[in-house]
Image (cartoon, helix red, strand yellow):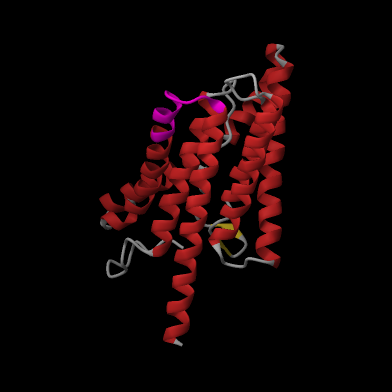
Amino acid sequence: MTPNPLDSREPFWTLETRLSTALLMLAGFIGAAAYTHSAGYFVTFMTGNTERAVLGGFLGDYTLALGAAGLIVCFLAGVIVASLCRRHWWTNHPHGATVLATMAFTVAAVVDSILYWHDKDLGLTPILFVAFGMGALNTSFVKNGETAIPVTYVTGTLVKLAQGIERHLAGGTHREWAGYAVQWLSFALGAFLGGLVSLVIDGRDMLFAAVIGSALVSVYTWLADARAIARHQHRI
């Protein structure tokens, strides 16, 4: 998926780099939408949700604990459903996961409009569908049955970034860490844009903005994937 950092002849700005950049920005934007217009729910940070699920009981906030546990379950469900779909229907096509995520975000926006039409902030129910969609996005890039580029697992990306910097200092090249830096910065930029948008629109509109953004990324990944397949067939 990511070009071999040890091969300086490999082009850096590959199709997968462009697609992952778009998806990471989308994930950052949607994470910001969910966090800024809800009770502080994480749809990308399952480590934080795990701690909330465990520690909420000790703090006496059982609503917080159950909500965090529900987000984890929905996130896992998104990964499982998208993985099953990928195995049987959209093998090696990143746009499939994005389409599924767009559908989940659309359901979240509709549910929020029905259940919380009088509120500016988002309730837990629509956020659960958003968490499902975020789980699905993490199956966009898979090698040997496992995620090659985690779209929401930024902690892992930072660890790889730091390890790449160490390898560069030990005699490698900037290619050891540059790809991970782009991934982290893409997520951060998406979160920044989401934060800016959240200043001028409410939670429901943020969800619909997420739907539009996800749909646009779905179209982009589908067109890019189709062009890549066409080029491959032309070479054959």
Return the residue nearer the eye: 141 or 174. 141
Instruction: Confirm whether residue 27 shows in the render.
Output: yes
Q: Is residue 168 left or right of residue 148?
A: left
Residue 156 appearing in the image = no
Q: Residue furthest bottom?
A: 236
Instruction: Indicate whether 160 appears above or below 199.
Output: below
Q: Is residue 59 above or below residue 146?
A: above
Judge left or right: residue 86 versus residue 98: right
Vertical position of residue 57 compared to residue 69: above or below: above
Q: Camera-side residue: 232 or 162?
A: 232
Magenta span includes 195: yes
| Magenta stretch: dominant secondary structure | helix
Residue at point 53% right, 50% down? 215
- Compared across the picture, whether 46 is left or right of 223 comes to right
Taking depth in this image into account, of 219 and 177 the one nearest to the observer is: 219
- Residue 129 locus on image (x, y percent): 67, 38
Tell me the residue at 61%/25% (across/down): 122
Query: 62 above or below 45?
Result: above
x then y, percent, for residue 85: 69, 60
* Quarter of the figure with residue 131: top right
Q: Which residue in the rendered view is the most extreme toward the top?
A: 60
Residue at point 47%, 65% (across, down): 223
Q: Is residue 69 magenta?
A: no
Q: Quadrant of residue 108?
A: top right
User: In this figure, what is the number of numbered marks?
Assistant: 0
Q: Position of residue 179 (x, y in %)?
A: 36, 53
**Residue at (35, 48) in percent of width and height:** 182
Task: Specify start and end residues of the magenta stretch as a single range.
Answer: 193-203
Residue 1 percent coordinates (x, y): 46, 63
Q: Quadrant of residue 14?
A: bottom left
